Image (spheres, rainbow, N blue to C red):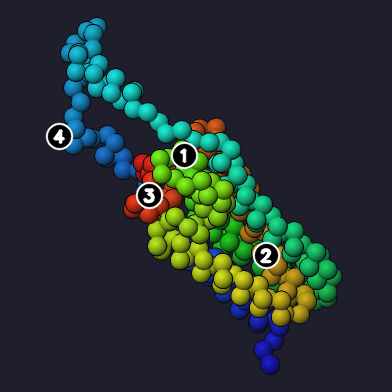
Amino acid sequence: RVPPGMRCAVLSAACAAVLLRSFVEVSIPRNTETLLVPAPGQMRPACFGRPGARPTVECRASTGDAGAKAQPQRSKLVQAWGAFGVVGYLSYGIQKVVPIVLDGLGAIDQWWQWGLLGACLLFFAYVEGYKGFQLGFSPRVVSRAYIVSEEADGAPFWHKLLAPAFCIGYFHGTKKRVITSWVVTLVIFAVVVGVKQLDNPYRAIIDAGVIVGLMWGVVSIIVLFVQQITRDKPPDFDPALPEDTMYTKPEL
């Protein structure tokens, strides 16, 4: 018979591996060279020929064209619904697990079990919270909330109605993104069922680590959303939109 502590460690590792593999995606950095050195065919005329000179006609025309480019209209309400809908989804999971943890931690009667709890909290804080949520899931959620808020021609209303699911990536994403989002949800559900088979305090120890990771995710989404609203600019993260999307893809 496998010792409970060993089963606890195996399930913790399995859960962390799923979260890390699915949530972490490298954001696409801006190409600074492209921004600083335009292609030969895209060179703009110099605005001033000499100190104190007025801008040339070509410069004024090009500047006017750039300023005349209309920005798409976006709904702050839809952005908030998408981001905070996901926050509510994560918070519901926290609420369901907290009573189990509080009840199960009372069963700890060995010093090494307290050590296992501390290690589990640190492990999930780094793997699920920092690596999984802060570096992957959270910026993608906020970025997709910005995307779905656009009043784009041909964009169905149900995208905005189901904005939280859009932000998670359950639909209107790359094939890899959509499949990954659904598979991860199913795998996490299976892991939750497996954790329920553990006796306390081992179930409570794992659930305590999960709570830390989920709380990290909630806070990171809120912080990124506030930054987005303040700057009117999404995080520099690939929202994983399909090629034929009707939304305006961000410049990364």
Q: Amino acid at mark 1?
A: Glu
- Mark 1 lies on a secondary structure that is loop
Q: Which residue is mark 1?
A: 150
Name the residue located 75 percent from the left edge and 59 percent from the top edge.
95
The residue lying at 20 percent from left, 26 percent from top is: 44
Residue 128 left/right relative to 28? right
- Which of disc 3 and disc 2 is earlier in sequence? 2
First along the sequence among labels 3 and 4 = 4
Q: Which residue is mark 4?
A: 40
Q: In this picture, is 107 found above or below 243?
A: below
The residue nearer to you, when weighing 163 against 136, is: 163
Per the rendering, the mark at residue 245 is: 3
Q: CA distance from mark 4 to mark 2?
A: 54 Å
Distance, label 4 to label 1, CA atoms, is 33 Å
**Marker disc for residue 202:** none
Label 4 vs 2, first from the N-terminus? 4
According to the picture, the residue beneath numbered tag 2 turns out to be 209
Task: From the top left corner, tell me how far across and down residue 239 is, in percent.
Answer: 44, 50
* Residue 227 or residue 1, whichever sits in front: 227
Compare marks 1 and 2 and give the one earlier in the sequence. 1
Q: Nearer the viewer, mark 1 or mark 2?
A: 1
Q: Residue at x 74, y 64 (%)?
A: 97
Q: Residue most toward the top?
A: 52
Label 3 and label 4: CA atoms lie apart by: 30 Å
Left or right, residue 228 beside residue 248? right
Secondary structure category for the residue under label 3: loop
